[in-house]
Image (cartoon, rainbow, N blue to C red):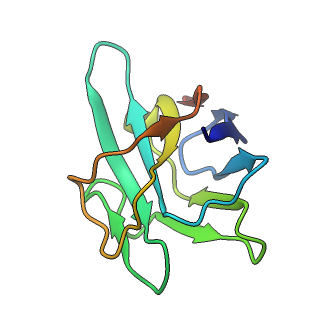
């Protein structure tokens, strides 16, 4: 069992930045991590992914060029740097991981473990 904890959410004005963190309590994020979001009244959508090893990443078209996913050197945390935030980025953001190595990231990977989510609100 992997316990994931997200942090770093908050309220910002349009154009602002936030950095979300996803940490694995008591384990490493060695199988890759995905970030998802769910806005009020909408379904959950994939935002980004970083593969287990190497440089494979994925970004949704709506965040490409504004969001950057990365991992720390210890392998216990993955970050989502979000710049130039827009009101449509308002959502609860979740990170997820799984039991099988992710070689190449895309929007269709299925995950086994999910965090509880962190709220991001972009409003003037």
- Residue at image location 45% in from the left, 43% down from the top: 86
Looking at the picture, how far across and down is residue 100, in whole percent?
A: 40, 60
Taking depth in this image into account, of 44 and 63 the one nearest to the observer is 44
In the displayed orientation, state which residue is furthest to the bottom. Answer: 54
Q: Is residue 73 above or below residue 40?
A: below
In the displayed orientation, state which residue is furthest to the top. Answer: 41
Looking at the picture, how far across and down is residue 62, in whole percent?
A: 29, 53
Position of 91 compared to 82: left or right?
Answer: left
Q: How many marks?
A: 0
Looking at the picture, how far across and down is residue 21, in whole percent?
A: 69, 50
Q: Quadrant of the C terminus?
A: top right
Position of 12 compared to 85: left or right?
Answer: right
Quarter-of-image position of residue 123:
top right
Q: Quadrant of the N terminus?
A: top right
In the displayed orientation, state which residue is furthest to the left. Answer: 108
Q: Is residue 113 above or below residue 38?
A: below
- Residue at image location 64% in from the left, 53% down from the top: 17
Position of 7 compared to 14: left or right?
Answer: right
Quarter-of-image position of residue 79:
bottom right
Looking at the picture, how far across and down is residue 4, in whole percent?
A: 65, 39
- Residue at image location 66% in from the left, 37% down from the top: 3
Q: Is residue 124 above or below residue 61?
A: above
- Residue at image location 37% in from the left, 44% down from the top: 111
Taking depth in this image into account, of 97 and 11 the one nearest to the observer is 97
């Amino acid at each position: 069992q992997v316990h994931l904890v997200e942090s770093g959410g908050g309220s910002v004005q349009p154009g602002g930045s936030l950095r979300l963190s996803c940490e694995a309590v008591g384990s490493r994020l060695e199988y890759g991590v995905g970030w998802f979001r769910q806005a009020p009244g909408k379904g959950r959508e994939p935002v980004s992914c970083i593969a287990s090893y190497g440089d494979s990443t994925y970004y949704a078209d709506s965040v490409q060029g504004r969001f950057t996913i990365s991992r720390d050197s210890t392998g216990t945390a993955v970050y989502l740097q979000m710049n130039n935030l827009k009101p449509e980025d308002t959502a609860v953001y979740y990170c997820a991981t799984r039991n099988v190595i992710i070689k190449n990231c895309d929007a269709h990977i299925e995950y086994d473990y999910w965090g509880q989510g962190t709220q991001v609100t972009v409003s003037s």
